[in-house]
Image (cartoon, helix red, strand yellow):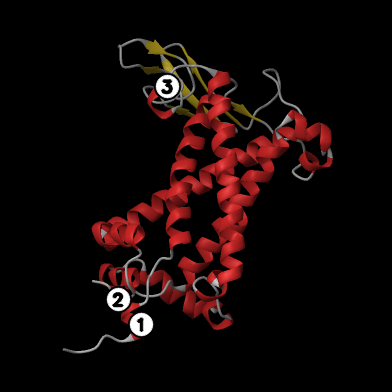
């Protein structure tokens, strides 16, 4: 019987990584759906300190006649059936910005949506803090996600990008170490998008505004913080979608199993 090499038996995902992965997935899903329910109360986004129905918005969702509409700047899109004007499960026409199947709760209840959003915001913040502290302590960011200078060279980045478009190479990446693009994207989420979402979320809280009036000013005002919060969540959602596509292409059963059990390096 041939002995396995150490790199074939090393656990791929530690307990903390797996716990944070699944907890974060649940928290993001709840925060996205409850955030959309909150957005239904005022489906317009502005830049600056203040924004009301009479002020120019850079993004808004609504309806006109029998059409649902999405306006981004000066551009208008017909979104009938899924944004602005849609039909609920009982066949009734609704004019909320986002449909009930995408919100939590499914009915319009601003207070309950805020409770869900705040609860899981704290879940996400505490989980992120524990994960980051544990990662620094155990060397996870240096070892598993650290990027060397040679990996940032244009040719190295180009080769890493090409690997993502080849199915064979993609499956090989799924059992080996993260390449430079994977590492950079994970670091951007962990130390960029998530902290930005936390800070912009705090900037919208009246209590935090009173205690730390300088915080929303960092983002150009309370409404700018709201817009950035929306864009940050959009960025996280795109990351999740791309992540799921990569998992489906590389082998969903094997990768899901490794994120539950830990897996081993080189597991096929």
Image quadrant where one finds the C terminus? bottom left
Q: How many marks?
A: 3
Q: Is residue 68 above or below residue 209?
A: above
* Quadrant of image for the N terminus: bottom left
Indicate the secondary structure of the residue bearing disc 1.
helix
Question: Can you identify the residue that label 3 sits on?
Answer: 106
Residue at image location 30% in from the left, 11% down from the top: 91
Badge 3 marks a residue whose secondary structure is loop
Give the Cα distance between marks 1 and 3.
48 Å
- The picture places residue 60, in percent across and down from the top left corner, at 57, 27
Q: Is residue 160 visible?
A: yes
> x%, y% of residue 230?
58, 38
Closest to the camera, between mark 3 and mark 2, is 2
The disc, 1 or 3, on the residue closer to the chain's N-terminal end is: 1
Q: Quadrant of residue 148?
A: bottom right
Q: Is 173 positioned to the left or the right of 68 in the image?
A: left
Tell me whether circle 1 and circle 2 mark residues in contact (CB < 8 Å). Answer: yes
Whichever of callouts 1 and 2 sits on the residue coming sooner in the sequence is 1
Q: Which numbered tag is attached to residue 164?
A: none
**Callout 3: 10 Å neighbours few (<14), some, many (20+)?**
some
> Is residue 193 visible in the rendered structure shown here?
no
SS at mark 2 in the image:
loop
Write down the residue under mark 2: 266
Above or below 247: residue 220:
above
Q: Earlier in the sequence, mark 3 or mark 2?
A: 3
Q: Nearer the viewer, residue 74 or 262?
A: 262
Up the image or down, 247 lies above or below 48; here it is below
Percent across and percent down for residue 28 are 49, 42
What residue sits 59% from the left and 60% below the top? 132
Residue found at x 55% / y 32%: 117
User: Which residue, given by chain and number where applicable, does mark 1 sit on?
Assistant: 7
């Amino acid at each position: 019987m041939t002995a396995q090499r150490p790199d074939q038996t090393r656990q791929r995902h530690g307990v903390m990584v797996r716990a944070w992965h699944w907890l974060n997935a649940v928290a993001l899903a709840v925060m996205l759906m409850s955030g959309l329910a909150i957005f239904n109360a005022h489906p317009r986004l502005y830049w600056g300190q203040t924004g009301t129905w009479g002020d120019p918005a850079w993004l808004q969702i609504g309806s006109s006649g029998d059409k649902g509409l999405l306006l981004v700047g000066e551009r208008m899109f017909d979104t009938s059936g899924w944004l602005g004007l849609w039909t609920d499960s009982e066949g009734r026409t609704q004019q909320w910005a986002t449909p009930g199947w995408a919100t939590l709760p499914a009915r319009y209840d601003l207070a309950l949506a805020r409770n869900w959003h705040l609860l899981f915001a704290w879940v996400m913040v505490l989980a992120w803090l524990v994960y980051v502290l544990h990662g620094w302590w155990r060397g996870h960011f240096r070892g598993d996600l650290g990027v060397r200078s040679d990996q940032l060279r244009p040719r190295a980045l180009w080769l890493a990008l090409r690997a993502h478009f080849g199915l064979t190479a993609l499956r090989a990446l799924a059992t080996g170490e993260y390449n430079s693009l994977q590492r950079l994207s994970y670091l951007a989420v962990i130390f960029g998008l998530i902290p930005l979402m936390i800070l912009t979320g705090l900037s919208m809280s009246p209590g935090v505004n009173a205690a730390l009036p300088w915080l929303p000013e960092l983002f150009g005002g309370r409404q700018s913080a709201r817009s950035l919060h929306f864009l940050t969540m959009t960025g996280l959602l795109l990351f999740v979608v791309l992540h799921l596509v990569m998992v489906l292409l590389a082998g969903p059963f094997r990768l899901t199993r490794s994120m539950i059990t830990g897996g081993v390096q080189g597991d096929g």
